[in-house]
Image (tube, rainbow, N blue to C red):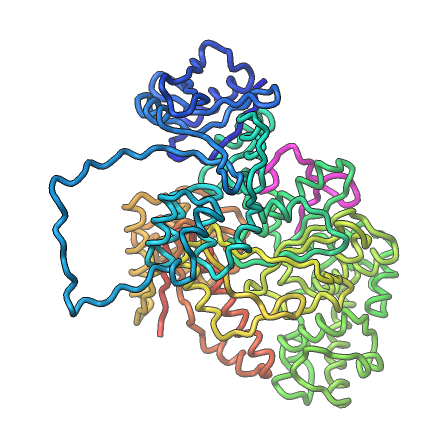
C-alpha cells in the first residue's frame, strides 16, 4: 500500500472537489494500480517522477512517485482542472536542495517576451528623494548568505534583497510555503544567519546514490514537516483533506513547535510566546505524543476557563480522534478540564477525607464544602464591618488578592500566623495594627463561608492541593495552557497532582495575556523550572500590521513572566495584510453606525458572518451592540458560555474571545471607562492600580490578536 505525503496545496478548491480528492487519495493509498485512477506519467516532463491522476472528468491530481527503500510513496502537489494539471505536471520538479538538504518543488515560470526596443535611459531628477536601502541590505544580508549559506533559490533571493521593508518581505514569504517562507520571515529580523540556520536545522544533505531515498530522507527533516506530512492511515487522510485554512495546524508544524511537542524534559518545562505563536498547538500535539508513546499514561490537560477547556477538548478531537479522552482523573488517557473544575473533581473524589484537607488549609471544619462562595462576598463583609482601614486596603481587590497570594498559599490559619507571614510582591506595607484589622475582615469572610458550607475558587484549589499532597499523585503528566492566569493555589494543586520527574509539568504561558490573575513567580510554589524554559516568537495567526497595533497597546507596561524576568516583545508575524483602522467617534450612535457599516462592507466582500466578531469590554455593551446591529439589518448574536454558531455576526466580551480567532474583528469601546470604573481604580493603592492598568492593556492586546486579517478599532474620547 502506498504512503501518501501531503503538501500545502497551492490552489484552493471547494468542498465538493475536496470530497472527490479525498476519495481519489483513499483509493490511491489502497492500490495505486487501480485502473480507474488513471495514474499516468507525463511525456517530456521536467521530472520523471511526476504523475497525474483522475479525480473526476474535470479535475486531476499532480503528484510525485518515489520508490525509495522498496516502498512506494506519493507526494501530492495539488489538484487542478485537467488542462492546467497537465501543464503544471510538465514543468514541476521535486528535488533536494543541495545547500540545506530540504525538499524543494520547483515550477518553471512562463518567460516574459523581451521588450521590442532598447530601454530608454532616464536620469533621476535632482529633487527626487534617494531611495532607502532595501531592508535585508540594511540588516547586513548578502546574496551569498541567502543562496550559498541558506539555500534560498537565486531568483527568490534577488526579490528578497530588493524588498524595501518588512511588509514587502512578508508578502514574498506568503507566496512560498514551508521552509522557504519561514526562512524569508526570519531574514527580516535581527537574528544572525547562524541562528536562522540552526532554528530550521539546515545542513548539507548526505547523498546515498539513490535519488528517491535521498528525497524521502529530505522529506523527513524537521523543517520539511512545515510543508510535507506523512499521512498515517485512511482516517488521518480524510481529516487532512477536509481541513480548511484554520486547520493546517493539525498537520504542518514549524520545526520549533514539533521539537517542543516531542522532546523529553527532566522536570517542569515552560514554553512562553505571544498570542498566535502556537503554544496551544504544541500542547495538543504533545498530549497526543505522550498518549501514543504510553497508552496507560494518565495525562491531564488543563487551562484557566471552562470555555478554553472546551476548545482544547475539541482541538484534541480534531487533531486525532483516536487519542482516548479520559472522563475522570487517575485513569489512562487525556483528561481535559478547566483548572477550577479539576479542583472540584479532586474534592468530590476525596470523600470524608476532605475534612482533613480543609483543616490543613483553613484550620477549621466545613462539613460539605462543595458549594461555591457567592460573588460579592468580600464586598458584603466590608460593608458590614466597622473597619478603620483606609480605602486602598478596605476594598474587594486588595483583600481578595491578599487572601489568594499570601494567606492561602501559606496556609495561614489565625491572626498570630498572619502577623508573621512574609508578603513578597505586595505593594502596601502593613504594620501590626493594620494586619490585625485585615485579619479581622478575613476571619469574617471565612466565618460567613463556613456558615454557608462553601469554598471560593482559590480555597478549593488549596484544599485540593492539601488532599493530593496527603494522598499521592493522580497523574503522570500535566499540561497547562494559559499559565499566566493561574493563582498560587492552582499551582500548588498542579504540583501535587503529579510527582516530580521526567515530563511531569509542561506549562504554556504569555504574561502579556494575563487578564485575570495577579503577578506570581512559579518558584515560590514548588515549581522549579531551572533553565528549562523556551520561547516561541513567530506569530502564525495575526498579520504583521495587526500585531504591530497590538504590541503598541502594551508599550510602557512593565510585564514580567512566571520566572520574574522581563517579558519579551520582539515577536514577528508570518503574514501580511491591511493596516488596522482606528476610528474615534463622538457618540454612541456614531459608534454603532460605524460598526454596522464596516460589517456590511466585509460581508459585501465575501466574508461569512461567523468569521466576523465584535469584541466589547463587558456583557452590558455586548447586549447593546447585538440589539443595535439587528436593528440596523445586520444579523448578530451574543456569545456567552455557549459555542459560537453560524449565520450571524458574533458579539462577545473580550474575555470570552480568549483562545479564539476570526477573519475580521471590531474592537468597540476601546479605552472607555465608566464613572464607576474610574472611581474603583481611584480607591486602589498604587501597586493594585498599576496591575489593573496592565490587565486592561492586556485585554485589548488579547482582543486585537484575535483578528487574522482585518481589524477595526472604534474608540471614544
Percent from the top left, x then y, of residue 200? 55, 47
Residue at the limit of the structure toward the top, as seen here: 35
Magenta span of residues: 315-338
Q: Nearer the viewer, residue 19 or 237?
A: 237
Q: Residue at x 57, y 51 (%)?
A: 198
Percent from the top left, x then y, of residue 570? 50, 63
Residue 20 seen anywhere in this rendered image of the structure: no
Left or right of residue 275: residue 117: left
Residue 23 seen anywhere in this rendered image of the structure: yes
Q: Residue at x 45, y 37 (%)?
A: 244
The N terminus, quarter of image: top right
Q: Nearer the viewer, residue 532 or 251?
A: 532
Q: Residue at x 49, y 11 (%)?
A: 34
Q: Nearer the viewer, residue 702 or 169?
A: 169
Total labels: the figure holds 0
Is residue 433 placed above or below 713 in the rendered structure? below
The C terminus, quarter of image: bottom left
Percent from the top left, x then y, of residue 642? 53, 48
- Choose top left, top right, bottom left or bottom right for residue 488: bottom right
Is residue 664 placed above or below 717 in the rendered structure? above
Is residue 341 within the magenta segment?
no
Is residue 316 within the magenta segment?
yes
Percent from the top left, x then y, of residue 42? 38, 18
Amino acid at each position: 500500500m502506498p504512503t501518501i505525503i501531503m503538501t500545502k496545496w497551492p490552489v484552493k478548491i471547494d468542498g465538493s472537489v475536496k470530497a472527490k480528492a479525498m476519495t481519489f487519495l483513499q483509493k490511491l493509498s489502497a492500490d495505486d494500480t487501480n485502473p480507474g485512477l488513471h495514474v499516468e506519467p507525463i511525456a517530456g516532463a521536467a521530472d520523471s517522477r511526476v504523475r497525474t491522476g483522475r479525480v473526476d472528468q474535470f479535475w486531476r491530481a499532480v503528484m510525485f512517485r518515489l520508490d525509495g527503500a522498496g516502498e512506494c510513496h506519493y507526494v501530492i502537489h495539488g489538484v487542478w482542472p485537467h488542462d492546467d494539471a497537465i501543464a503544471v505536471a510538465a514543468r514541476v520538479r521535486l528535488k533536494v536542495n543541495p545547500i540545506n538538504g530540504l525538499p524543494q518543488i520547483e515550477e518553471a515560470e512562463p518567460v516574459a517576451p523581451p521588450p521590442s526596443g532598447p530601454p530608454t535611459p532616464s536620469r533621476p531628477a535632482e529633487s527626487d528623494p534617494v531611495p532607502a536601502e532595501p531592508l535585508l541590505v540594511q540588516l547586513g544580508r548578502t546574496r551569498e548568505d541567502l543562496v550559498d549559506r541558506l539555500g534560498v533559490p537565486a531568483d527568490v533571493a534577488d526579490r528578497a534583497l530588493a524588498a524595501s521593508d518588512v511588509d514587502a518581505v512578508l508578502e514574498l514569504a506568503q507566496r512560498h510555503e514551508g521552509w522557504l517562507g519561514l526562512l524569508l520571515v526570519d531574514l527580516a529580523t535581527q537574528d544572525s544567519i547562524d541562528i536562522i540556520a540552526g532554528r530550521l536545522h539546515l545542513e548539507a544533505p548526505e547523498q546515498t546514490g539513490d535519488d528517491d531515498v535521498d528525497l524521502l530522507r529530505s522529506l523527513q527533516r524537521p523543517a520539511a514537516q512545515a510543508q510535507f506530512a506523512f499521512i498515517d492511515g485512511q482516517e488521518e487522510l480524510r481529516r487532512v483533506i477536509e481541513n480548511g485554512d484554520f486547520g493546517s495546524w493539525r498537520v504542518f508544524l514549524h520545526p520549533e513547535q514539533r521539537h517542543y511537542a516531542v522532546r523529553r524534559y527532566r522536570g517542569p518545562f515552560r514554553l512562553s510566546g505571544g498570542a498566535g505563536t502556537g503554544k496551544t498547538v504544541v500542547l495538543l500535539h504533545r498530549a497526543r505524543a505522550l498518549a501514543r508513546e504510553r497508552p496507560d499514561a494518565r495525562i491531564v490537560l488543563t487551562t484557566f476557563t471552562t470555555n478554553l477547556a472546551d476548545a482544547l477538548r475539541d482541538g484534541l478531537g480534531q487533531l486525532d480522534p483516536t487519542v482516548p479522552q479520559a472522563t475522570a482523573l487517575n485513569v489512562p488517557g487525556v483528561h481535559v478540564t478547566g483548572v477550577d473544575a479539576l479542583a472540584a473533581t479532586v474534592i468530590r473524589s476525596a470523600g470524608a477525607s476532605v475534612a482533613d484537607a480543609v483543616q490543613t488549609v483553613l484550620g477549621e471544619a466545613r462539613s460539605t464544602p462543595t458549594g461555591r462562595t457567592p460573588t460579592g462576598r468580600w464586598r458584603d463583609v466590608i460593608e458590614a464591618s466597622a473597619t478603620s482601614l483606609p480605602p486602598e486596603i478596605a476594598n474587594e481587590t486588595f483583600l481578595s488578592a491578599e487572601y489568594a497570594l499570601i494567606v492561602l498559599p501559606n496556609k495561614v490559619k489565625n491572626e498570630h500566623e498572619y502577623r508573621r507571614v512574609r508578603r513578597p510582591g505586595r505593594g502596601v506595607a502593613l504594620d501590626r495594627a493594620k494586619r490585625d484589622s485585615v485579619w479581622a475582615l478575613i476571619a469574617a469572610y471565612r466565618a460567613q463561608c463556613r456558615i454557608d458550607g462553601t469554598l471560593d475558587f482559590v480555597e478549593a484549589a488549596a484544599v485540593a492541593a492539601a488532599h493530593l499532597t496527603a494522598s499521592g499523585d493522580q497523574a503522570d503528566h500535566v499540561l497547562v495552557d494559559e499559565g499566566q492566569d493561574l493563582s498560587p493555589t492552582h499551582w500548588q494543586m498542579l504540583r501535587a497532582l503529579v510527582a516530580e520527574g521526567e515530563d511531569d509539568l509542561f506549562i504554556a504561558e504569555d504574561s502579556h495575556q494575563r487578564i485575570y490573575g495577579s503577578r506570581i513567580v512559579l518558584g515560590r510554589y514548588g515549581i522549579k523550572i531551572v533553565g528549562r524554559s523556551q520561547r516561541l516568537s513567530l506569530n502564525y495567526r495575526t498579520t504583521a500590521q495587526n500585531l504591530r497595533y497590538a504590541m503598541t497597546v502594551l508599550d510602557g507596561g512593565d510585564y514580567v513572566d512566571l520566572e520574574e524576568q522581563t517579558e519579551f516583545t520582539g515577536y514577528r508575524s508570518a503574514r501580511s495584510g491591511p493596516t488596522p483602522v482606528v476610528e474615534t467617534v463622538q457618540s454612541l450612535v456614531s459608534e454603532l453606525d460605524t460598526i454596522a457599516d464596516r460589517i456590511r462592507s466585509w460581508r459585501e466582500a465575501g466574508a461569512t458572518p461567523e468569521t466576523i466578531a465584535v469584541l466589547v469590554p463587558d456583557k452590558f455593551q455586548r447586549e447593546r451592540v447585538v440589539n443595535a446591529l439587528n436593528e440596523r439589518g445586520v444579523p448578530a448574536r451574543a456569545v456567552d458560555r455557549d459555542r459560537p454558531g453560524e449565520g450571524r455576526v458574533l458579539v462577545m466580551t473580550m474575555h470570552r474571545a480568549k483562545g479564539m480567532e476570526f477573519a475580521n474583528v471590531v474592537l468597540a469601546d476601546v479605552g472607555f471607562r465608566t464613572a464607576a470604573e474610574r472611581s474603583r481604580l481611584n480607591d486602589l493603592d498604587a501597586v493594585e492600580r498599576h496591575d489593573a492598568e496592565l490587565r486592561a492593556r492586556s485585554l485589548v492586546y488579547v482582543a486585537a490578536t484575535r483578528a487574522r486579517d482585518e481589524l477595526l478599532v472604534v474608540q471614544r474620547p
